[in-house]
Each structure stands twice: as structure tokens, then as C-alpha cells.
Image: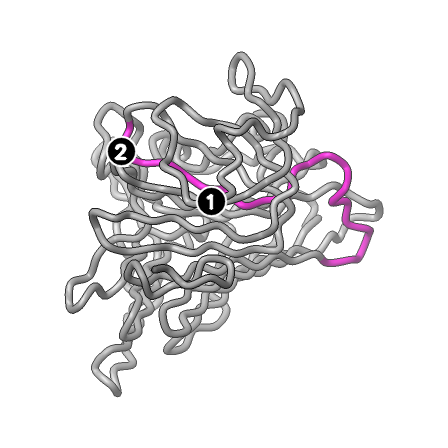
């Protein structure tokens, strides 16, 4: 249990930082705690749980005085799924380490999952490895050292700037040889009947049996997403490559948009059929192209900009 003491910075009445220990689960009548860091400005509110993978439990935007979720926990909108305390979490993976056992209960361990690649490649940083290194009115910096021979050192930064949340992830390879490392982030988004996406990509890996990526093909017309297009009603769970690094999501009923930009090389779109959530995961695939030399560092940046429909630009073109 964290011993960090809660404190606030509230000079303008709109910024609050809180590191109060908070319950993230229960097992055999015992409570499990993580510190909670909450940042806010006039546009956005962010809550991070360092003790649960450094993930985000809440990300909301100020819709004319009403705080409205941008990221959602799947358990909030769907019954019959595992308890999920996170609405978004970072991914740092490598085939060079074995998954470390955690003392967290199984229902919480189950929240740190992504696509089929995670069955073959382990997380570099354990769930409880992240520690708060620095925090101020608009930003939070976490750091972690992997438990296995201290082979990796990672930094995770969150920053609010107006209507934009920026997430930066950096990892240093402290091994004596080059290792493929994948860096990504997985936010969960609400899925309405009219949710649309624009995320053009030239090719993709099709999912096969057991969600294994089985076939590499040019992007079919139904999944090109070159213009704003309704999210397909059928199940989608593919890795898209040849991505330009920008995507736009729109929720006409809710009257807001989310633009995601990143320097990651690909993305995975996971949209379960008949569910009220989906995920858009920018990341680097572990295909040998992202090897990090001994002693070197690699970093990725992810920007999330929220606005009302009509106020954002779509790849440089204003909405009508």
C-alpha cells in the first residue's frame, strides 16, 4: 500500500493533484491498493494508477460544464467480461524476458492483456513496478526497472496541454545484446451505432484461428478507413501497417471527436461484435524491425486531442 500523502494544487480552481491510495480490487476479503494521481485542466481530467501497470482509470473532457468519458473501462459498459479497472494502459513487450508473477489478484492480472502477440511476448515491466518520480499541475512522470536482472529501465510520462493528452514512453535496453522491443498504448473507447473512424493504412495482418495473425494482405476496401467511415458492425481484430500516424474518431450522437496521433509504426483495431466498446492500439509490431541495441533507448509518443464535432481538423481539412 502506498504511503504517499494526498496533496492538491488548486490555485486556479481547475487543477487538482491527488496521490491518495485507492482500492483497485478485493481478494478473500482483503483490499488491494494503488496510489492514484489525478491531473486536470479546464478541458481534461486524467486519473492514473501507477500500481496497476501505470494505466489510466479515467480520462474525461469538459463538454460545456459536464465531465464526459473519453476512455472507458470495458466493465463499465459490458456485462459478462472480466473486471477491468483500466480504461487505457501502456504496452512494453519483448521476447527476451519471461512474464513475472505478480501478487495482484487474478481478476486484476487479467486486465493487462492485448492482442494475440501478448501470448508469445511478455511484458517488460511488471504491474507494480511503476513508481511516481515527478508530479506537477499538468504532468506526471513514472519510472520502472524490470525485476529480471534489471534488464530494462522505462519512463512513462503523462501531460495535459489544453484539449490534448500526451503520453510518452521510453525504454532503455540494459542488456548486453540487441533485443526487439514493442512500445504501444491501448485505450478503450465507447462504441455507438454511429461511431466512425478515419485511419488509412496500406496493408494489414488478418487474424486467424485463436486470434493469431495469419495472413498479410493489402487493406481490403471495407477496412481502408481512408475517409470517415462507420465502424464495421462485424468483428474486427487486425493489425494495420503502412499507417500515416494519425486517426480520427467521431461520435455524432455524443457530438465529440478524438484525434489520435503517434510515431508508432502500426495499429491494432479491436472491435468485438455487439459490444459497446472497442480499442485502437498504436504500437510497434515485434517483427525484428524495432530491435534496440545494448545500452540504447527508444521512445514513442501518443497524442489524444478531444473536441466538439466541427472544431477539430481532419488531417488538415476542417469539418464542414
Q: Real-space Cα distance between discs 2 and 1?
A: 23 Å
**Where 104 falls versus 185 (above or below)?**
above
Tell me: residue 212, above or below residue 86: above
What residue did someone put label 1 on? 227
- Disc 2 versus disc 1: nearer the observer: 1
Mark carried by residue 276: 2
Q: Which mark is residue 139?
A: none
Residue occupying the far front of the picture = 320
Horizontal and vertical percent position of residue 10: 25, 82
Q: Is residue 245 visible?
A: yes
Q: Secondary structure at mark 2?
A: loop
* In this rendering, position of residue 64 left or right of residue 287: left
* Rendered residue at 38%/22% (across/down): 234
Q: Residue at x 50, y 68 (%)?
A: 133
Residue 190: give x, y in percent of width and height: 29, 42
Q: Nearer the viewer, residue 77 or 247?
A: 247
Q: Image height check: is 318 above or below 241?
A: below
Magenta residues? 275-297
Crowd class of label 1 (few under 14; some 14 to 19; many from 20; radius 10 Å): few
**Residue 208 included in the magenta stretch of the image:** no
**In screen coordinates, is 206 left or right of 294?**
left
The residue nearer to you, when weighing 63 against 202, is: 202
* Residue in view at x 50 percent, y 42 percent: 281
Taking 25 as reference, is 263 left or right? right
Kindly give the residue lying farthest to the bottom in the view shown. 11
Q: Is residue 149 left or right of residue 295?
A: left
Amino acid at each position: 500500500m502506498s504511503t504517499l500523502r494526498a496533496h492538491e494544487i488548486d490555485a486556479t480552481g481547475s487543477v487538482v493533484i491527488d496521490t491518495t491510495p485507492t482500492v483497485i480490487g478485493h481478494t478473500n476479503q482483503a483490499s488491494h491498493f494503488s496510489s492514484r494521481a489525478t491531473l486536470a485542466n479546464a478541458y481534461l481530467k486524467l486519473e492514473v494508477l501507477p500500481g496497476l501497470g501505470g494505466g489510466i482509470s479515467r480520462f474525461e473532457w469538459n463538454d460545456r460544464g459536464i465531465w464526459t468519458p473519453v476512455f472507458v473501462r470495458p466493465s463499465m459498459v459490458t456485462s459478462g467480461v472480466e473486471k477491468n479497472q483500466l480504461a487505457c494502459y501502456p504496452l512494453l513487450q519483448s521476447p527476451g524476458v519471461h512474464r513475472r508473477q505478480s501478487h495482484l489478484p487474478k481478476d486484476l492480472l487479467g486486465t493487462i492483456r492485448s492482442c494475440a502477440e501478448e501470448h508469445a511476448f511478455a511484458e517488460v515491466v511488471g504491474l507494480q513496478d511503476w513508481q511516481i518520480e515527478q508530479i506537477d499541475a499538468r504532468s506526471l512522470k513514472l519510472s520502472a526497472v524490470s525485476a529480471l536482472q534489471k534488464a530494462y529501465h522505462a519512463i512513462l510520462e503523462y501531460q495535459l496541454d489544453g484539449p490534448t493528452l500526451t503520453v510518452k514512453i521510453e525504454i532503455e535496453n540494459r542488456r548486453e545484446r540487441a533485443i526487439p522491443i514493442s512500445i504501444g498504448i491501448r485505450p478503450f473507447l465507447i462504441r455507438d451505432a454511429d461511431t466512425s473512424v478515419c485511419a488509412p493504412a496500406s496493408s494489414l495482418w488478418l487474424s486467424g484461428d485463436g486470434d493469431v495473425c495469419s495472413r498479410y494482405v493489402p487493406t481490403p476496401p471495407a477496412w481502408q478507413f481512408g475517409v470517415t467511415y462507420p465502424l464495421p458492425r462485424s468483428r474486427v481484430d487486425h493489425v494495420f501497417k503502412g499507417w500515416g500516424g494519425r486517426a480520427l474518431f467521431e461520435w455524432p450522437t455524443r457530438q465529440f471527436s478524438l484525434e489520435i496521433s503517434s510515431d508508432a509504426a502500426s495499429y491494432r483495431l479491436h472491435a468485438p461484435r455487439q459490444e459497446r466498446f472497442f480499442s485502437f492500439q498504436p504500437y510497434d509490431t515485434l517483427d525484428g524491425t524495432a530491435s534496440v541495441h545494448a545500452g540504447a533507448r527508444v521512445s514513442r509518443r501518443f497524442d489524444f486531442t478531444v473536441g466538439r464535432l466541427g472544431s477539430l481538423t481532419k488531417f488538415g481539412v476542417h469539418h464542414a
